[in-house]
């Protein structure tokens, strides 16, 4: 198993541009989570999906952020328009909700908005 | 309000010494996880603790859970440099999402 796959690994973009982060969860996992990590705020859960359905998006900072999961093997997190304060590492994680193994995290996308 | 608090937030310790990281959580938990994160890397699962009194050990790390006290500990024995990392605990209950602690940045000094 290749684990949770995120792309791109690094993204540098100008303020105002649209950014799309991608995630492929582990096959068979039915829950997917998007986290943001910064020095100031630590790990923040942005949104999570169960069986491709968004369950809790209360962590999404504002309307500039949106997330989709069109099928069990793919999710996107989009920021439009991006701002410098969105600079962070964004992690995707997946799990099988009925098991005790916790979440498996991807390698993350380091986003820099200049 | 659900809170998961770790202490200390920062810890520098000499090689060969023992120390404990504490994780307190404010509401009921049925599972408690410990993760490790190396600088610039992802989070790696270390332990899952499922019941009161559970103890798990891997190498120089040992984790325990006291659900009555709402406390988990991560004990480091005879620390070595390779253990330098940030350690997170995370609390889970029922169908709720994992709630992570603030993290403890551990630096092992030769």
Image (cartoon, coloured by chain):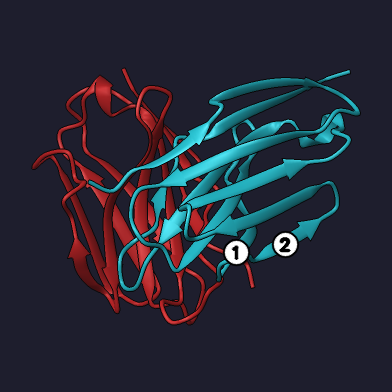
Chain colours: A red, B cyan
Quarter of the image for residue B10 reads top right
Counting other residues with Cα less than 10 Å from the Cα at mark 1, is it few (<14), some (14-19), or many (20 or more)?
A: many
> Do residues under tags 2 and 1 come within 8 Å of each other at their CB atoms?
yes
On the image, the x and y values in percent for residue A74 come to 36, 68
Which residue is rendered at x = 59% and y = 52% of the image? Answer: B34
Instruction: Say which mark, if any, is on residue B56.
Output: 2
Please tell me whether residue B23 is drawn above or below residue B30 in the rendered image.
above
Chain where mark 2 sits: B
User: Label 1, on which residue?
Assistant: B48
x then y, percent, for residue A40: 37, 22
Q: Is residue A21 left or right of residue B74?
A: left
Q: What chain does badge 1 belong to?
A: B
Mark earlier in primary sequence (2, 1): 1
Please rate how many residues cluster around mark 2, counting C-alpha atoms within 10 Å: few if below 14, some from 14 to 19, many from 20.
some
Per the image, label 2 sits on a secondary structure element best described as strand
Which one is in front, A69 or A58?
Answer: A58
Q: Residue at x 55, y 70 (%)?
A: B50
Report x, y in % for residue A31: 37, 71
Residue A76 is left or right of residue A103, and the answer is left
Q: Residue at x 28, y 61 (%)?
A: A48
């Amino acid at each position: 198993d290749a684990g949770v796959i995120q792309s791109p690994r690094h993204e540098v973009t100008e303020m105002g541009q649209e950014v799309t982060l991608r995630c492929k969860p582990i096959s068979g996992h039915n829950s997917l989570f998007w986290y943001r990590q910064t020095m100031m705020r630590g790990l923040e859960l942005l949104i999570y999906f169960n069986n491709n359905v968004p369950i809790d998006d209360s962590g999404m900072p504002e309307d500039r952020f949106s997330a989709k999961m069109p099928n069990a093997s793919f999710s996107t997190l989009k920021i439009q328009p991006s701002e410098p304060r969105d600079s962070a590492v964004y992690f995707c994680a997946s799990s099988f909700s009925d098991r005790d193994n916790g979440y498996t995290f991807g390698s993350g996308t380091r986003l820099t908005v200049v | 309000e659900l809170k998961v608090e770790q202490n200390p937030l920062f810890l520098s310790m000499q090689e060969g010494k023992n120390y404990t990281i504490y994780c307190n959580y404010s509401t009921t938990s049925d599972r408690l996880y410990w993760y490790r994160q190396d600088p610039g890397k992802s989070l790696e699962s270390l332990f899952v603790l499922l019941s009161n009194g559970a103890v798990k050990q891997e190498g120089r790390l040992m984790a325990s859970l006291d659900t009555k006290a709402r406390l988990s500990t991560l004990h480091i024995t005879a620390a070595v440099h390779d253990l330098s990392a940030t350690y997170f605990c995370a609390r889970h209950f029922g169908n709720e999402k994992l709630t992570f602690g603030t993290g403890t940045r551990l630096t092992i000094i030769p």
